[in-house]
Image: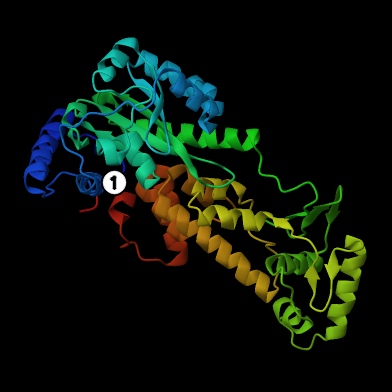
Amino acid sequence: MTDPWVALEPGADPAEHARMLRRAHETFTEAGTVTRPVRSVVAESWRRSARAGVGPDGTASVELVDGDLGAYRAEHPLARVMPLFRELMGTFAADGEHLLAVCDANGRLLWVEGHPATRRDAGRMNFVPGARWAETAMGTNAPGTAVAVDRPVQVFAAEHFIRRVQPWTCAAAPVHDPRTGRVLGAVDITGGDGLAHPHSLGFVQAVARAAESQLALLTPERPGADTPELTVLGRDEAHLLTGGRRIRLSRRHSEILVLLARHPEGLTGDELLCALYEDESVTPVTLRAELARLRRVLGPGLLASRPYRLTVPVECDMAVVERRLETGAVTAAATAYAGPLLPGSQAPAVVRLRHRLAEALRTALIARRDPDLLADWAHAPWGEDDLDVWRALAVVRPTATVRARLAALEGELGAPADWPGAAVRRGGIPS
């Protein structure tokens, strides 16, 4: 399987694959053993479902109806992007006899819209607004599993844990709060076997990303009105917004502010010397003169001494990326990453911070396996020679262009081509 999150390999026979899955499902429900061709993501979900006490003949419970449902939906953050969901997915769902569904972070369905006949069929298994489709309640299913694992996921036929859901195929992607990275819920497309295609998974993933971008515009991440803002990513000279003024800082002043924003407790002169200068012959007098010039640039009251420190918290775009990575909001972190931290700086501490941030983000992107996010990094100036990212991209998006660029890069770097996934890069399927 090229991508473990996609239900069917290209060229696979859906009917035959569904029959094999039904046999595997029966084996699991009778003996607790997972057999081929069950994907690892589905096997892990089946085990979680069984541990949660879900039975294969269960039924979804409807927890919210009428006024309670309406009030809950009106207050939910995803209500703000429902017009976007309808614009991007409504026609596709109606014309393809599919359903557009949106659930909250607990797997509770909030909206189910689409083809009328398909809605009636789905209603017979309580796939309706207000019903709880969390994995812990209904076993393996795309919206419930997507919020459980915080990953876009596709579920085909008998991969569903509940038998009455097995005639269906669905794909869902989680939607995050762009400010905090918290999972708000998931957007889902549900219908027949025709959805067992990589495009349907990529479609809902793209819709989820669009929703996160829309939410970011509707509720922009802004510090308090009096909080200075420091922009240091993708630029050699930082910008500081403070007191209504936008200040363009010199490279050295940019480095100093990055370090002081990073250390609100302050740094001694000796600590700043070691952090800023590779040349040990630089004297404390030189540093004090630089700090005096910075104090004049910033104005009174912002820079204190003994130790050197900022007198108020400063919001830095580097810290925004770090916070989002810490909460698992990889898409939001990648969106906020405008480029390497002060890329021209050679200050030892800044170089370490730059490498640490870039490595954390690229590692998260490789683990996420989102082809769009990987492609964005690979085609950016800082990622065009990133061999590991190009290799990861070749696994999830093995186009001729990607394979050609990877081959050229391996040739330039003298890198071996026997890495995991190299068969995909060459156009084959790994064993």
Nearest the camera: 404 or 3? 3
Q: Is residue 238 left or right of residue 368?
A: right
Amino acid of disc 1: Pro
Q: Is residue 407 left or right of residue 300?
A: left
Residue drawn where x is 35% and y is 21% of the image: 99
Nearest the camera: 28 or 352? 28
**Residue 182 image offset from top left, x and y in percent:** 50, 45
Residue reaching furthest to the top: 116
Q: Is residue 342 left or right of residue 290?
A: left
Q: Image quadrant for the C terminus?
A: bottom left
Image height check: is 416 above or below 424? below
Q: Which residue is mark 1?
A: 4
Residue reaching furthest to the front: 68
**Residue 339 image offset from top left, x and y in percent:** 63, 54
Count of number-bearing discs:
1
**Residue 271 image offset from top left, x and y in percent:** 72, 81
What colouring method underlies this structural image? rainbow
Q: Please say whether residue 384 is visible from this viewpoint.
A: no
Residue drawn where x is 32% and y is 33% of the image: 133
Image height check: is 312 above or below 70? below
The answer to which quarter of the image holds residue 138 is top left
Q: Secondary structure at mark 1?
A: loop
Q: Please say whether residue 128 is visible from this viewpoint.
A: yes
**Residue 291 image offset from top left, x and y in percent:** 86, 73
Residue reaching furthest to the bottom: 281
For mark 1, does the 10 Å Cα neighbourhood hold few (<14), some (14 to 19), or many (20 or more) residues?
A: some
Residue drawn where x is 28% and y is 18% of the image: 123
